[in-house]
Image (spheres, rainbow, N blue to C red):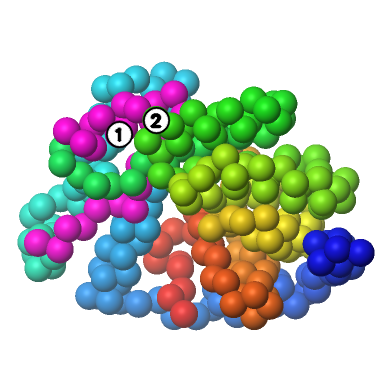
């Protein structure tokens, strides 16, 4: 039995304590939030973590160009000056577009003399239901056009039917197609059914080479919740303890209004 098979066998036996997760989520939501200048500092930090995104059917080169300019200067200059942050180079983390618009984003950012990364969704986003070779080709095309971050989506059918090795194999192929580009694996948590499936999908995605695990496509009815975040972050912690390798958590959608978010 290979090491991979042993790991997958262990993952298949994992069960998440739902009541414990819900209790912890309630405790987090009851914590105090930062005020005044500390609140402003956290909000500004949040801006720098955003992938400014357009994933619309009517995207055009001009839409993408405007998005890139907004990503380069996401906060009004007068506000930054009041906070004495006008010379700190505040930008979003990246610009995110469909594969067909990657070249437009790269061109716009280059013209603006910006090194901001271009991210691209791929692998049959948002459903992940296209043939595997088509999904792989999407990744290769986006990378060839200049994307340095690729947001892949898992095939939810594999998770819902417990085909964890098949999911691992698909994600490994996406990892290879990404080359040097960072790979974010979107779990689409609103379609996974249980916390246990979220944990298992998180672990498989990390084992297969993901740099980030991401809550959702933004297209599902449920995109992010406190309990799901706890499960995903716990999986990241467990993976770090087992391997020494740090993976990152990316949220799509919103948990709540900013004034309800605890900073712990």
Q: Residue furthest right?
A: 1
Residue 11: which quarter of the image? bottom right
Residue receiving disc 1: 106
Task: State the residue lying farthest toward the front.
Answer: 2
Q: Quadrant of the N terminus?
A: bottom right
Residues packed near mark 2 inside 10 Å, few (<14), some (14 to 19) or many (20 plus): some
Residue 104 visible in the shown view: yes
Nearer to the camera, 117 or 16: 117
Q: Earlier in the sequence, mark 2 or mark 1?
A: 1
Q: Residue at x 82, y 51 (%)?
A: 165
Q: Nearer the viewer, mark 2 or mark 1?
A: 2
Q: Is residue 251 left or right of residue 63?
A: right
Residue range corresponding to the magenta coloring? 87-111
Q: What element does badge 2 sit on?
A: loop
User: Is residue 40 located in the magenta-colored stretch of the structure?
Assistant: no
- Residue sitting at 59 percent across and 45 percent down? 176
Question: For this view, does 36 lie left or right of residue 160?
Answer: left
Query: Disc 2 vs disc 1: Cβ atoms closer than 8 Å?
Result: yes
The x and y percentages for residue 160 are 83, 47
Instruction: Tell me the element at label 1.
Output: helix
Q: Which residue is label 2 attached to?
A: 145
- Give the crowd class for mark 1: few <14, some 14-19, many >=20 residues within 10 Å: many
Q: Is residue 185 above or below residue 104?
A: below
Is 176 above or below relative to 67? below
Q: Residue at x 44, y 24 (%)?
A: 100
Residue 13's x, y, as percent?
A: 89, 67
Tag shown at residue 85: none
Residue 57 at x, y = what percent?
Answer: 47, 21
């Amino acid at each position: 039995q290979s090491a991979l098979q042993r790991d997958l066998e262990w993952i298949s036996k994992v069960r998440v304590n739902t009541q414990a997760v819900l209790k912890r989520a309630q405790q987090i939501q009851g914590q105090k939030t930062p005020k005044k200048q500390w609140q402003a500092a956290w909000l500004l930090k949040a801006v720098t973590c955003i992938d400014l995104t357009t994933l619309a059917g009517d995207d055009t080169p001009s839409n993408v160009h405007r998005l890139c300019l907004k990503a380069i200067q996401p906060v009004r200059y007068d506000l930054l000056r009041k906070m004495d942050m006008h010379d700190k180079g505040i930008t979003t983390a990246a610009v995110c577009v469909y594969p067909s618009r990657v070249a437009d984003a790269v061109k716009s950012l280059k013209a603006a003399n910006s090194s901001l990364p271009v991210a691209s969704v791929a692998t049959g986003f948002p459903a992940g239901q296209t043939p595997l070779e088509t999904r792989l080709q999407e990744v290769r095309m986006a990378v060839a056009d200049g994307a340095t971050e690729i947001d892949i989506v898992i095939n939810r059918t594999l998770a819902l039917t417990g085909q964890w090795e098949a999911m691992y194999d698909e994600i490994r192929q996406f990892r290879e197609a990404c080359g040097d580009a960072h790979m974010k694996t979107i779990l689409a948590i609103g379609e996974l059914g249980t916390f246990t499936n979220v944990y298992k999908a998180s672990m498989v995605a990390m084992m297969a080479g993901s740099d980030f695990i991401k809550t959702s496509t933004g297209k599902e009815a449920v995109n992010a919740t406190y309990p799901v975040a706890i499960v995903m972050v716990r999986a990241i912690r467990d993976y770090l303890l087992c391997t020494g390798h740090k993976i990152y958590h990316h949220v799509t959608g919103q948990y709540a209004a900013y004034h309800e978010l605890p900073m712990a």
